[in-house]
Image (cartoon, grey):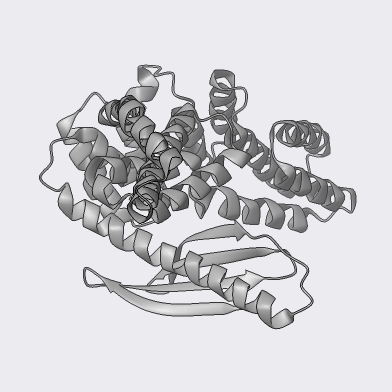
Amino acid sequence: MADIGLNQNITIKDRNFHIQTATNLEEGFIRTEVFDQGRLLYAEHHKYERRDSTEESGAELRLRRIVDQFHQNAISSLETLFELSDMIVEQKHFLSHQRLGAIFLSLHLFDKAEENLLKAIDLNADSNSSYVILSKCYYLQKRYHQAAQTLEPLIRERVPYPDLYNLYGLILLEQKNYTQALNHFRHAIKLNPSYKEAFYNLAAAILQRIGFLRMQNKRDEIRKNLEFFVIVLQKIRKIGTKRDALLVEQVKQALAARKFGRVQSLMHDYRNQQFNYSMSPAVVGYEFYMWLRYLPGRLDYETLRYFDEKISRSLNENTDYPDMWNYLALIHLMLCRDYFLKGLDNFKEATKINPRFTKARKNLRLVENDGREFLSLIKAILRD
């Protein structure tokens, strides 16, 4: 069976996007990419269950349905975000603007991200996290001076946010200030010893410093930095996923073969895949938050299953997100409510067809009487 692909141009608010979704049969995943004027905004990888089938046509039909589902989800998600942006433009709820700004930033739609983040800061000037997200928006556009200026007041106040020091380290790294960049990555790790991205950035900073030392032929310093680089790689392997472990092995093999260019290429590609062009678990949660707050009536079974799968997939790779577990619990309760109401309708249908069906009538009464507390509980949780 050959790989399957879909391509589609869509227009949202006078903006033209190109969506392409394709299988990678060899690796067993489906990749969706979203482009704006030829610029890659973001990409998502979806693992799918590969089944042995004696009938290739049946397997291909099933896979085509899965590809189409992911493709349509990407389009629907993008359209909904612009709809939400219009809905909250006059809202004075800073958290909604902050979270929608973070979502747009993860999609590299910088103008929409900046618009919402500045609104969030205008509504709540004490929100440190809004400044960090806004600075990242500037950083990703290579507006390093503005990015640094946005963070410097928080740095002076020693705000204990790991993301703050990690991002400031990245800005310093772009300015070739290796020593200070390393110090800020270390401080981010001190605040969060399991901060994988900060460890990765620490390794990348060491690698850049090694490149600088190679030009000066400082062999002793190169050796010391290489030893430190390998130590950091081992830490990434320890706290990371199987994908991280694979990267570490590939980098170590390239180092052993003295292929320094290969090491740099691996690190660069990994940053793009894991941090620059993928949606973080927190942002996936923000998307559900916006739906729950502004589009609760459209959270039907299919949409809830979409968020269930998306959040569960994120938590499989990154478990340390309490907000995400909270959102997943809400989704499961809402699915329970959906099944509960379907069950109620099923009992009613049974008694309608056969009014003398005693067991069904008894079950219906139990569900109608005792189920009210269950529905009231879910309603109260969702309202809070």
Residue shown at the point (23%, 52%) measured from the top left: 84
| Left/right of residue 80 with respect to residue 187 in the rendered view | left
Residue shown at the point (50%, 72%) measured from the top left: 68
In depth, the one of 56 and 239 nearer the eye is 56
In depth, the one of 175 and 105 nearer the eye is 105
Residue 189 in percent (x, y) is at 59, 24
Q: Residue furthest right?
A: 257
| Left/right of residue 354 with respect to residue 314 in the rendered view | left
Residue 144 in percent (x, y) is at 39, 45
Quadrant of the snapshot with the N terminus: bottom right
| Left/right of residue 349 with respect to residue 274 in the rendered view | left
Up the image or down, 53 lies above or below 240; here it is: below
Residue shown at the point (48%, 45%) measured from the top left: 308
Residue 137 in percent (x, y) is at 36, 47
> Picture quarter containing residue 11?
bottom left
Up the image or down, 269 lies above or below 121; here it is: below
